[in-house]
Image: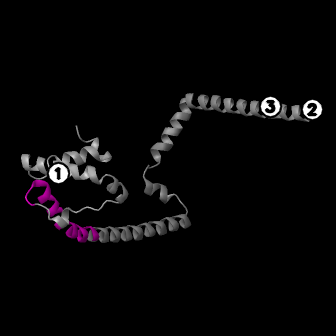
């Protein structure tokens, strides 16, 4: 038990000593910064030192300069590889944009009412086949009502399609006011 109290005393003494040393350093720094001769010497040193990266590099030993030059060469090689990567990405984007374009055109025609989908195009298979079987009777009733409603209103395309998309997609909904 006595050893434990000695350890605690030593630890508190160490903390106290560190705190006193820190206080002394702060006081010394304050005194130095108050001295106009010290401030003038610091300002003269800063004025004589060019603050450009190249001047810093010039002060380094030759071996360090060689390493820096080697790092620059590696960085240039990385930049060339990255440029090649982005060229290939751009080529892929162009290739797939050409593949998507007919689908986008067809989508635009459906949305604007310029074309009607065929039965094969409008057939949709849900992943929830069981739910569809359970709701089969209700679905038939809704289909009959939708046909009667569609015949009455004769709506062209899909009204407010993009507005609905923007409103229901989390990333885009904040843009809609």
Which residue does the numbered mark 3 point to in the structure image? 13
Which residue does the numbered mark 2 point to in the structure image? 2
Residue range highlighted in magenta = 92-115
Alpha carbons under labels 2 and 3: distance apart = 16 Å
Residue 61 is situated, as x and y percent measured from the top left of the image, at 55, 62
Give the class, few, some or many, for how many residues have Cα within 10 Å of label 2's Cα (few <14, many ≥20): few
Asked which secondary structure carries label 3, the reply is helix
Residue at x 19%, y 65% (from the top left corner)? 121
Q: Earlier in the sequence, mark 1 or mark 2?
A: 2
**Dots 2, 3 in contact, CB < 8 A:** no
Verify whether residue 104 appears in magenta: yes
Residue at x 28%, y 70% (from the top left corner)? 92
Q: In this rendering, which labeled residue sits more in front, label 1 or label 2?
A: 1
Give the class, few, some or many, for how many residues have Cα within 10 Å of label 3's Cα (few <14, many ≥20): few
Alpha carbons under labels 1 and 2: distance apart = 93 Å
Q: Quadrant of the C terminus?
A: top left
Q: Is residue 12 left or right of residue 3?
A: left
Query: Is the residue 88 above or below the residue 140 in the image?
Result: below
Q: Nearer the viewer, residue 31 or 141?
A: 141
Asked which secondary structure carries label 2, the reply is helix
How does the figure colour the protein chain or chains?
A: one colour
Residue at x 45%, y 43% (from the top left corner)? 47
Q: In this rendering, which labeled residue sits more in front, label 2 or label 3?
A: 2
Query: Is the residue 16 above or below the residue 117 in the image?
Result: above
Q: Nearer the viewer, residue 140 or 13?
A: 140
- Can you tell which quarter of the image residue 170 is in? top left
Magenta-drawn stretch, dominant element (helix, strand or loop)? helix
Query: Is the residue 76 above or below the residue 9 in the image?
Result: below
Which residue does the numbered mark 1 point to in the structure image? 144
Q: Quadrant of the N terminus?
A: top right
């Amino acid at each position: 038990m006595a050893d434990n109290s000695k350890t605690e005393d030593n630890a508190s003494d160490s903390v106290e000593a560190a705190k006193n040393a820190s206080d002394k350093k702060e006081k010394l720094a304050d005194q130095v910064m108050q001295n106009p001769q010290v401030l003038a010497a610091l300002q003269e040193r800063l004025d004589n030192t060019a603050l450009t990266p190249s001047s810093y590099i010039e002060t380094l030993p030759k071996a360090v300069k060689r390493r820096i030059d080697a790092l620059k060469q590696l960085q240039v090689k990385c930049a060339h590889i990255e440029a090649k990567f982005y060229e290939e990405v751009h080529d892929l984007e162009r290739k797939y944009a050409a593949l998507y374009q007919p689908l986008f055109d067809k989508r635009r025609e459906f949305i604007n009412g310029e074309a009607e989908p065929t039965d094969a195009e409008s057939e949709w298979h849900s992943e929830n086949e069981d739910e569809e079987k359970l709701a089969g009777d209700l679905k038939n009733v809704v289909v009959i009502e939708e046909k009667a409603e569609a015949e009455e209103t004769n709506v062209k395309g899909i009204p407010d399609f993009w507005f609905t998309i923007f409103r229901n997609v989390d990333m885009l909904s904040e843009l809609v006011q």
